Amino acid sequence: MKSPVAAFGGAKVLVAGGLGFIGSTLAIRLIELGAEVTVVDSLDPDYGGNFANIAGYETRLGVVVADLRDRERLPELVQGCHYVFNMAAQTGHVDSMRRPVNDLEINAAAPLMLLEAVRADCPEAVVVYGSTRQIYGRPDYLPVDERHPLRPVDVNGVSKQAGEGFHTLYHQVYGLKTAILRLTNTYGPRMRIRDARQTFVGIWLRRVLEGDRFEVWGGTQQRDLAYVDDVVEAALLAAATPAAHGGVFNIGGSPPLSLLDLAQATIAANGGAGGFDLKEFPAERKSIDIGDYWADDGLFRRTVGWAPQVDLATGLRHSVEYYRANLARYL
């Protein structure tokens, strides 16, 4: 894998959603690479922002509590930036159906406002946008590559597709250096585990650590999972590699496995302690479930030289260890 170290030493970087799961992990990695990092996060209690995510790094980065929809704040945030990583998002699929306008504002309008600020105040900056595999909907074929039709099955997918469209447009029309990453299920330390609003893996980990059983809905669906450190390295390489600018890329992870097998792997990561109950899908989730999915991310691998480094068993074990030591801070 190429090293992004040289690109970020001394660079001024903004990470939107920087107190959340992926954003905070990215911010910490950037600090370690010598960047001057500012994170902006709304700290909306419904989402993943948590000061626990930057524990030990509080004095080494700037923190701005603000909503990207507050466009008056954006010029000062992007001024002088070399890199802008937008990991701010509403990720709940059911939430997007319950509050569609809110999802549209966060996942489409806010990224557009940020792009406008970059265009006006730091047009040479590289902008990396964290998108989602949800925009594909139910796959026609597997693995899914970037040529697959886009047929989102929920408001979240439609909003993220719009967010992507703005980044592509601003690259084509204004020459902004954008890169779009369609992420598969991402897991690891710092993800929201108090409930299933961000990821089902989080609530599974909480249940096994608390000695409770968790629910597996369906169970036969095949999914690939990406460990957060691998996703962060993908974002850094997308930013640091000119050949990636203007591109749209899938980011996958471990080889696909069924949710039943993933449940067993989660219990194994906890030393074999835990159990689960197999359940039918709740009606409101079944209608928007995409079934089997795993990514063909060969385009990104060829473009930047990236490949996942953390296997599933190791990533789950690291996650269990992290939350065993920090559980109270995430409830």
Image: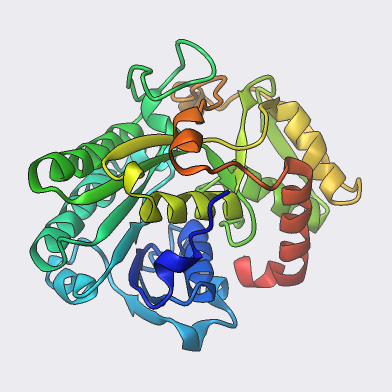
Residue shown at 77% from the left, 29% from the top? 261
Q: Does residue 148 sit above or below 74 in this rendering?
A: above
Image location of residue 247, percent across then percent down: 31, 38
Q: Is residue 306 left or right of residue 236?
A: right
Q: Quadrant of residue 114?
A: bottom left
Image location of residue 280, percent across then percent down: 64, 22
Image location of residue 271, percent across then percent down: 91, 50
Viewer can see residue 276: no
Viewer can see residue 206: yes
Query: Seen from this angle, which residue lies furthest bottom?
Result: 59
Q: Is residue 107 left or right of residue 188?
A: left
Q: Does residue 174 sit above or below 191 in this rendering?
A: above
Residue in front for this viewpoint, 52 or 144: 144
Q: Is residue 330 left or right of residue 141?
A: right
Image location of residue 12, percent across then percent down: 32, 74
Q: Does residue 64 sit above or below 106 in this rendering?
A: below
Residue in front for this viewpoint, 280 or 14: 14
Residue shown at 57% from the left, 74% from the top? 52
Residue in front for this viewpoint, 131 or 281: 131
